[in-house]
Image: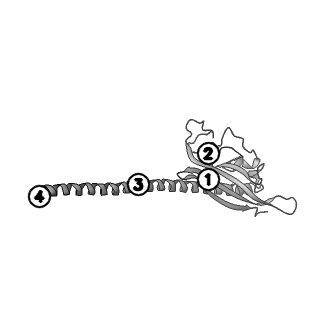
Amino acid sequence: MPKKNAAFTLIESIIVMVILALGLSGAVYLMITVTNLVKENQRRIEATYLAQECMELTRNARDSAWKQHKPWNCAFDGGFAEGAKWQIHSDPTKVPSNLPSVSTDCQSDLGMVLTKETSNFKLFKETGKPVNYDGSAVDATPTPYERELIISNIKNNPNPPNKPIEAQFTCEVSWEGQGGPQKVSLSQILTDWKK
């Protein structure tokens, strides 16, 4: 009789180990899923901050132009057109040296650099040194993000001289997420309220 109980105990032990293995594999899967979700949420938060920075830089461009007694949209001269795309940087040391910049008198004292119609909207980590946006700088560290500023819905003054009095500025930050391409988009309408 003791041999029957020993065999029954062995079967019970195997069943318990299988149940534990299934439970532990479920817990490991849950931990991996939570870790991936946390990483994706961190990227979404960073992208939202980058889009918010873009919105603030756009408002700063308008307000700085007014402070210099220049037209509200002078920072975007040469590209203030429907669907125009810009790359915007908060620090002149991050301007792409190999891409053409819009050179207007208005941009000289804005504390930012605007580059019109670039083909590469990739963002690089701040290094304090100039970065070529083809990644050729020695310490250029790419981020997973691309940021572009799009100007649309431009409304002109119906009276001469038909200058723009309102436009929608949309900042889009995109990156490749786990489930495919991801994007955060913020929009604001800026007006020439000092006209």
The percent position of residue 165, horizontal first and vertical second, equals 78, 61
Of the image marks 1 and 4, the number of the one nearer the N terminus: 4
- Residue 67 visible, this angle: no
Q: Amino acid at mark 3?
A: Tyr
Q: Nearer the viewer, mark 1 or mark 3?
A: 3
Q: Which residue is mark 4?
A: 1
Q: Which residue is mark 3?
A: 29
Q: Quadrant of the C terminus?
A: bottom right
- Say left or right for 38 vs 96: left
Give the CA distance from mark 4 to mark 2.
75 Å
Of the image marks 4 and 2, the number of the one nearer the N terminus: 4
- Say left or right for 21 vs 163: left
Q: Amino acid at mark 4?
A: Met
Give the CA distance from mark 4 to mark 3.
43 Å
Q: Nearer the viewer, mark 1 or mark 4?
A: 4
Q: Are marks 4 and 2 in contact (CB under 8 Å)?
A: no
The percent position of residue 97, horizontal first and vertical second, equals 67, 39
Q: Nearer the viewer, mark 4 or mark 2?
A: 4
Tell me the tag on residue 28.
Answer: none
Q: Which residue is mark 1?
A: 173
Of the image marks 2 and 3, the number of the one nearer the N terminus: 3
Q: Quadrant of the N terminus?
A: bottom left
Q: Could you tell me which secondary element the residue under label 2 belongs to? A: strand
Tell me the tag on residue 122.
Answer: 2
